[in-house]
């Protein structure tokens, strides 16, 4: 088809193994995947073996050479940062936390074309280069606490988990069509704070 893809990325990690009652893991990644498509002229002229019927080139000029939208699973946010740690408290207790942050994914706005000639129907047309607009950055903090004790031959562990501890509410998805009646309507947001209590028994 004449398509090509370039991936560039760097990952930094740091780890503290368990000693002196605590441990830590951290990671930061910066990466991007860019797609390169045949030009409209290539489609028209069929150069380099490219078939003019390969696909609809409507949005190619606004997508060619731009970061992947991530919808194919090949590439998501350009940067991701994660930090987790655990501390062993006195009395058979421990506390842990996990911080997860990433760039907001792309918000590629479109408008829908009229019905086209040749029975081609409508198509959603990008109104700006792919990746020009992103959702707000995503940040989430989870926390964990547990207390372990023994009774006869059994071991009991009582635990509390807090997901999205700070109750962040970033918008994760919106209606992208700008000529729709519900344009920019938020369809997905991060789930609110959740507390979970548990008891584990080992025989």
Image (cartoon, helix red, strand yellow):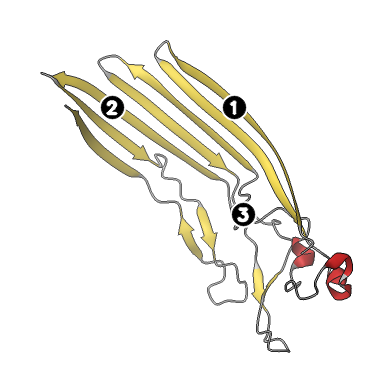
Q: Residue furthest front?
A: 49
Give the quarter of the image for residue 20.
top left
Q: Is residue 43 above or below residue 149?
A: below
Circle 1: element type: strand
Q: Are marks 1 and 3 in contact (CB under 8 Å)?
A: no
Q: Earlier in the sequence, mark 3 or mark 2?
A: 3
Question: Residue at coordinates 61% horizontally, 47% vertically from top-left?
Answer: 77
| Cα gap from disc 1 to disc 3, whole angstroms | 23 Å
Rendered location of residue 46, percent (x, y):
86, 72
Q: Earlier in the sequence, mark 1 or mark 3?
A: 1
Circle 3: element type: loop
| Cα gap from disc 3 to disc 2, whole angstroms | 37 Å
Circle 2: element type: strand
Q: Nearer the viewer, residue 135 or 92?
A: 92
Rendered location of residue 32, percent (x, y):
69, 46
Q: Earlier in the sequence, mark 1 or mark 2?
A: 1
Specify few, some or many for label 3: CA neighbours under 10 Å numbering under 14, 14-19, or 20 or more: some
Say the numbered circle drawn on residue 13. 1
Give the quarter of the image for residue 112.
bottom right
Say the numbered circle drawn on residue 197. none
The residue carrying mark 2 is 146
Rendered location of residue 151, percent (x, y):
12, 20
The residue carrying mark 3 is 70
Question: Residue at coordinates 62% horizontally, 72% vertically from top-left?
Answer: 178
Q: Is residue 68 above or below residue 82?
A: below
200 displayed left or right of 69: left
Q: Are marks 3 and 2 in contact (CB under 8 Å)?
A: no
């Amino acid at each position: 088809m004449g398509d090509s893809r370039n991936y560039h990325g760097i990952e930094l990690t740091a780890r503290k193994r368990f000693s002196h009652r605590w441990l830590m893991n951290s990671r930061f990644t910066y990466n991007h995947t860019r797609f390169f498509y045949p030009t409209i002229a290539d489609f028209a002229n069929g150069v380099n073996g490219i078939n003019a019927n390969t696909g609809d080139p409507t949005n190619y000029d606004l997508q060619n050479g731009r970061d992947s939208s991530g919808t194919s699973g090949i590439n998501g946010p350009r940067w991701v940062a994660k930090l987790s740690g655990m501390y062993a408290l006195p009395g058979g207790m421990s506390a842990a936390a996990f911080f997860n942050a990433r760039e907001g994914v792309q918000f590629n706005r479109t408008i829908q074309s009229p019905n086209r000639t040749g029975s081609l129907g409508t198509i959603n047309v990008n109104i700006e280069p792919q990746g020009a607009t992103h959702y707000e950055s995503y940040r989430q903090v989870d926390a964990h606490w547990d207390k372990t004790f023994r009774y006869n031959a059994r071991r009991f562990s009582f635990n509390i988990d807090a997901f999205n501890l700070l109750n962040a509410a970033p918008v994760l998805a919106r209606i992208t069509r700008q000529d729709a009646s519900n344009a920019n309507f938020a369809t997905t947001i991060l789930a609110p704070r959740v507390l979970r209590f548990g008891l584990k028994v080992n025989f």
